[in-house]
Amino acid sequence: MTDSTLVLTAHVGDFVWRAAGAIALANSRGQRVVIGCMSFGERGESASLWRKGYTLDQVKAHRREEAEQAAKVLGAEVRFFDANDYPLVETPALLQGLIDLYREVQPSVVLTHAPADPYNGDHAFAHQIALKARVLAQAPGVEGPGEVIGAPPVFCFEPHQPEQCGFVPDVLLDVSEVWERKREAMEILAAQKHLHAYYTELGARRGLQAARNSGPNLGLPNETRAEAYMRIYPQVTRELS
Amino acid sequence: MTDSTLVLTAHVGDFVWRAAGAIALANSRGQRVVIGCMSFGERGESASLWRKGYTLDQVKAHRREEAEQAAKVLGAEVRFFDANDYPLVETPALLQGLIDLYREVQPSVVLTHAPADPYNGDHAFAHQIALKARVLAQAPGVEGPGEVIGAPPVFCFEPHQPEQCGFVPDVLLDVSEVWERKREAMEILAAQKHLHAYYTELGARRGLQAARNSGPNLGLPNETRAEAYMRIYPQVTRELS
Amino acid sequence: MTDSTLVLTAHVGDFVWRAAGAIALANSRGQRVVIGCMSFGERGESASLWRKGYTLDQVKAHRREEAEQAAKVLGAEVRFFDANDYPLVETPALLQGLIDLYREVQPSVVLTHAPADPYNGDHAFAHQIALKARVLAQAPGVEGPGEVIGAPPVFCFEPHQPEQCGFVPDVLLDVSEVWERKREAMEILAAQKHLHAYYTELGARRGLQAARNSGPNLGLPNETRAEAYMRIYPQVTRELS
Amino acid sequence: MTDSTLVLTAHVGDFVWRAAGAIALANSRGQRVVIGCMSFGERGESASLWRKGYTLDQVKAHRREEAEQAAKVLGAEVRFFDANDYPLVETPALLQGLIDLYREVQPSVVLTHAPADPYNGDHAFAHQIALKARVLAQAPGVEGPGEVIGAPPVFCFEPHQPEQCGFVPDVLLDVSEVWERKREAMEILAAQKHLHAYYTELGARRGLQAARNSGPNLGLPNETRAEAYMRIYPQVTRELS
Amino acid sequence: MTDSTLVLTAHVGDFVWRAAGAIALANSRGQRVVIGCMSFGERGESASLWRKGYTLDQVKAHRREEAEQAAKVLGAEVRFFDANDYPLVETPALLQGLIDLYREVQPSVVLTHAPADPYNGDHAFAHQIALKARVLAQAPGVEGPGEVIGAPPVFCFEPHQPEQCGFVPDVLLDVSEVWERKREAMEILAAQKHLHAYYTELGARRGLQAARNSGPNLGLPNETRAEAYMRIYPQVTRELS
Amino acid sequence: MTDSTLVLTAHVGDFVWRAAGAIALANSRGQRVVIGCMSFGERGESASLWRKGYTLDQVKAHRREEAEQAAKVLGAEVRFFDANDYPLVETPALLQGLIDLYREVQPSVVLTHAPADPYNGDHAFAHQIALKARVLAQAPGVEGPGEVIGAPPVFCFEPHQPEQCGFVPDVLLDVSEVWERKREAMEILAAQKHLHAYYTELGARRGLQAARNSGPNLGLPNETRAEAYMRIYPQVTRELS
């Protein structure tokens, strides 16, 4: 059985800025990666397109294309729920769609937003519904195609202003070997150009932190590139390291 | 270079009840394991010996022998600082002794007590001085034999009443394959017999929790035996799992 | 005026595993105890019945009968809201039904779920709506039969994986004298047999903890059986103990 | 066996402002109450005496006399450790004195300061050493006269600026029936006259809060007078209320 | 450009008890202040009117008139959303109305409820929707009249039982110079007369606390009157003070 | 009366990396700024000098000179306590020296380390003793030259790995106008060259965060340079902003 990673995001841009390294890394090791974007980020994260006079449909189409290109660069499949953002709200269709996706993908790892974000309520909502759908997908009594899932660990990716979101990294993932692919994916997101420098610097900063916190065995160099994550459930392991 | 594990405890019994699984597991994989016991637990954790009329020296000798036997069963070396318990307090000799031990062992993993324990102040103290000595052992300006150490991860083992100590497990370590050796080590501690049943049950309970939280890849069975730990520093890794 | 206890749960099994001791104890002292089950736990907590091929109606009927038998053993009345589980969601009927039940029972004590449970969203939801209905039932301007209620204390019972749910016991209730009735009630729940051993051990473990934390006056023995609770509002008392 | 209450404070005034109600209440029920004052509050809480030109010895004598009078009004014994305040620090004599007092009094209830106070470090210190001595007094291996003690519950009284000290009341103690004695004791403390109005108002405010949080059974009136406390260990009880 | 303050409350009374000082102060400095009341507090905070036999419409009319008078005294405009209280719930109309009000007022400061209140769920809801609407009003893609808003700081006012609501003051606002106007506004709220004494005392208590925490520059006297607030976002400033 | 700022640090480098902006800003407004360095950072933060073969005295002399130069660039006075680092411990001389310095400077603002730092125990110690000395310096009964001090606000500067230290910024200070002087001061610290790039980036990042959190009135540009601080006591103010 092959491993697979499921990434659930509020908006199309989120998987690029926050988790492209983890995605490319999983892909580079032969895993299947499926990204579920709950909305296109059409209202809340496309200001530059609105300022150009795009219509709603044009904004969506543009963001969709960007997401598809970025996913391709990272070696991932992408699904769109088109559930409307700002505010993203729960509908029966969205919830069932997520349950079905869990059962289809049978993920061994789940990535999604952190629990709180006072700068963007859609992120907190996406976290909640991603966890809710995961629990529902585990129950034989809940309808849906395919087999129930197991208990995949959940990793929350880093929000834009982590301290104000209660985000404290518990995992620093070394993504140095796929950093070029993250950079390439970021460049596709032309509508949010101001974020490129920020996330490039963040990758280096988390990398330096990873180096400083890596024990003598791992021994990472200062030039490491890393992404930070926060776990929801305890780590289960056969070795302390 | 071989991995090595350094275990720093307040009293001689602590490494058996709380970390024997991790110790035996490291040993079974060819690692060196060194245990530093700051005291013999002579005043605070030897009530049954005092009730038999032992003198202080007899209590210490008895606890020392138990610790040596238990360490042997687990495949570990043990060092005694004999720094007096109840209360265990900081002395220059204890602090320097710990720094020197860090530099001698060059640990890739450190195990010690959790930061708080309202039922036993020695445990909280041992946590503090273990972390303090680790930071000092990293500095070239601090005297002592041998090379400065790197930044080994620190894992806090589970206190006796975890919820009242602010202990929330972030790591569940599968110790099933060495459980028999933990059981054997526990049986050596005749002075604290009432704890055998408790820690046997705890091993099964943490094991079941590990099974419930293990993703489809690890797929642990319900009969797993586990120990719980809490990290002080973020995990640094090359793979999310 | 007689005391009365109101127990509000997400699923039918919850009152047995988590609060049967408190229920039987209240009953043994002549109190009225009313249990309100928001759902039958038909989807989320009846996996063994689904695997046997039961239909939804058969699952519900089966769980209802179990709950009625268990309530009888404990000396309590039980009401069913049949509001569907996995996910349990707010409807005007459920909310009004809970308000009405508060006003009918006029509870002096309320028991319900803890605020968070990342393993089961229904539990967190049940907590929220139980507290919401309690506040609404206090207001003269909110419609419903009977008198407004006072301010009964609320006790949250212990979730299955307490540490991951932020559950820290503030109350340990000695239920030794009714433990046999809890055991008998647990045996009725054939669909969740794997939980019997777990909750039997938990009763002993919380009992030992109660013994260790009981002052010289109460002086509980090590063989105590106890249930753990967490308060939402401060304790109001005429004596420190 | 008679109940007894042990009150451990940093300065002589603390037991009056923060715990006089609990003390008088215990006394009124026939309990022995012993107050241990670690210092006279001579440097930190006697500003008005210094401004009058008193010498250190005069300040101490004055505060001692006030404390003795106040204790008498409340029906309690008082012991003075004269360990110097501002800063109050640990000495072997103070620690052993506290252990001995625990063993002499064999308390069924302990009252002391809360864990943190950024406005007065002596309060936080007194909390720490009071808890440390309690644990040491439980151990047969620790020297001292008398029998080891059991596990009396510990209640922290309310600091002057509770929110900045992390103080959240978990217990509201109805002290209405002894309020006049608290008032009388407060009037004795002439050196801190500005606090009379504050603690009179606090008694009424905590009383109103107690009324609002008391269930239908206790049913306290709005005119209740109360003191707030925070527990260190879980409550152990035979009845939820 | 003139400063303006937007105050968003669950019920009509809230702005008087909790924020009248801040409102009158802003008005006294020439700012525009607009108050948005989500409901009239007709069910949950008008018990005395229901007991007099008022109909729902009469209750609403009465509370509306009080609010208008109080706002006039404080120099503020008031808008009513009439969204029904107990429970106050999200509707598209309420959310859009709040977005529109943000865009109309273009606030430089926002005041609303704190995040949690276990005594009144409407308060926590009002907090959530006030913050949600603020973020939505910032996005060019969200429809509505007028310009998008900037990032005004948000201050949460003090709930009635602050400690049980997790409220820790980070800002103490000196409102001494407008205290008479707060007093006058409070007197208008005849339906909640029991709160006058409480909030008068609170103003003095927070004032004394402000005096004790004011550095030598501000140097506030003990007779200060103050209101407490909690920030959601970090303070941005050009001077530490 | 002129304002004055007192900065208390564990090691000589700390005031440059963490607070140079605040210092230069205060100086630029005509305030007196006094920096108290508890140690030279000779053991813990001078690794490059030890590697060059410097003796202890040479290391201290070198770090002292750097500190004097950096202080001069920032317009501040600097005092050295030479209390030895790694570990920095409390001595009567250090405590009295700090009390005396508080009384001499009569600060209107105090800057020091944050309460916790698992990477450097000296920082946490310096925080504790800085706060302890501040409270002692307020008491007439504590000896020392000069007048007692008032209640200056305390701001904790940002540690190197903020999230692992529990540091959440509550104040973002715009230091753009003095950024060149901070840069110049940083360049003096040749022994810690690897930190220049880090703190340059941090200044830009906190500046961007300040811009994003500044309301419409302050309206900071994205190119702002800022330093982050955390308050120990509530802000006291005459205006919400």
Image (cartoon, coloured by chain):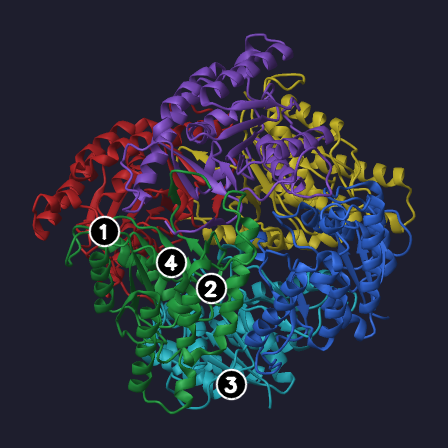
Chain colours: A yellow, B red, C purple, D green, E blue, F cyan
Q: Are marks 2 and 3 in contact (CB under 8 Å)?
A: no
- State the image coordinates of residue C41 (x, y, percent, origin top left): 58, 21
Which residue position is annotated with label 1?
D149
The type of residue carrying mark 1 is Ile
Query: Which chain letter matches label 4?
Result: D
Q: Residues within 10 Å of mark 2 (few under 14, many from 20)?
A: many
Residues at marks 2 and 1 touching, judged by CB atoms closer than 8 Å: no
Query: Disc 3 sits on a residue from what chain?
Result: F
- The residue tagged 2 is F115
Query: Is the C-beta separation of discs 4 and 3 under 8 Å?
Result: no
Identify residue for label 3: F106
Q: Which residue is mark 4?
A: D25
Which marked residue is nearer to the observer: mark 1 or mark 4?
Answer: 4
Say which residue appears at 37% left-offset and 30% top-offset.
C203
Assess whether mark 4 and mark 1 are in contact (beta carbons under 8 angstroms).
no
What's the residue type where badge 2 is placed?
A: Pro
Q: Secondary structure at mark 3?
A: loop
Where residue B72 sits, quadrant-wise, is top left
Viewer-nearest of labels 4 and 3?
A: 4
